[in-house]
Amino acid sequence: MSGFILRIVINAVSLAVAVDLVGGLRFEGKWWMMLLIAVIFGFVNSFIKPLLKLLTLPFLILSLGLLTLVINAFMLELTAWLSRGLDLGFYVEGFWAAFKGALVISVVNMLLHWATAGMYRQ
């Protein structure tokens, strides 16, 4: 259970860093709302992203995996759309903001997972 909570916190921190660094990503809410957005982001990445990757597998192979960057941007936009429906205050303004945000989130997630590797097992 603590590994699950740690992953949510890592996602929340990654999202917060992306909001801070990338123009076009906005968060207008209380800090605990970012934790809910991180849960939504984790859900989208756990259930929808693998299905989308499976459906686009031929294009992923042809693009040598570069389509994954576009899929990551789409997952961020989907998270913003779902959080807008719940009035959580997370907004993505366009594809390029989502693309840059997804890159920042990926890098920060990777660094935080490395830093906390001994704290839980996946």
Image (tube, rainbow, N blue to C red):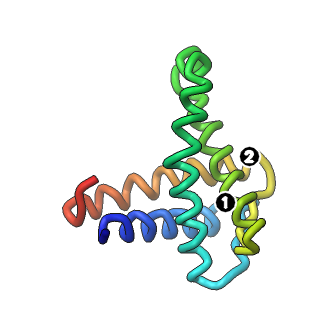
Instruction: Name the residue nearer the viewer: 60 or 16.
Output: 60
- Residue at 53% x, 17% y is 61
Dot 2 lies on which element? helix
Q: Quadrant of the N terminus?
A: bottom left
Tell me the residue that label 1 is attached to: 22
Q: Position of residue 80 (x, y in %)?
A: 71, 60
Please give the label number shown on residue 96. 2
Instruction: Name the residue nearer the viewer: 95 or 85.
Output: 85
- Residue at 52% x, 20% y is 64
Q: Position of residue 68 (x, y in %)?
A: 56, 34
Dot 1 lies on which element? loop
Image quadrant where residue 52 sits: top right
Callouts 1 and 2 close, C-beta under 8 Å: no
Three-letter code for the amino acid on which mark 2 is drawn: Trp
- Residue at 37% x, 61% y is 112
Please give the label number shown on residue 39. none
Q: Is residue 91 left or right of residue 48?
A: right
Three-letter code for the amino acid on which mark 1 is drawn: Val
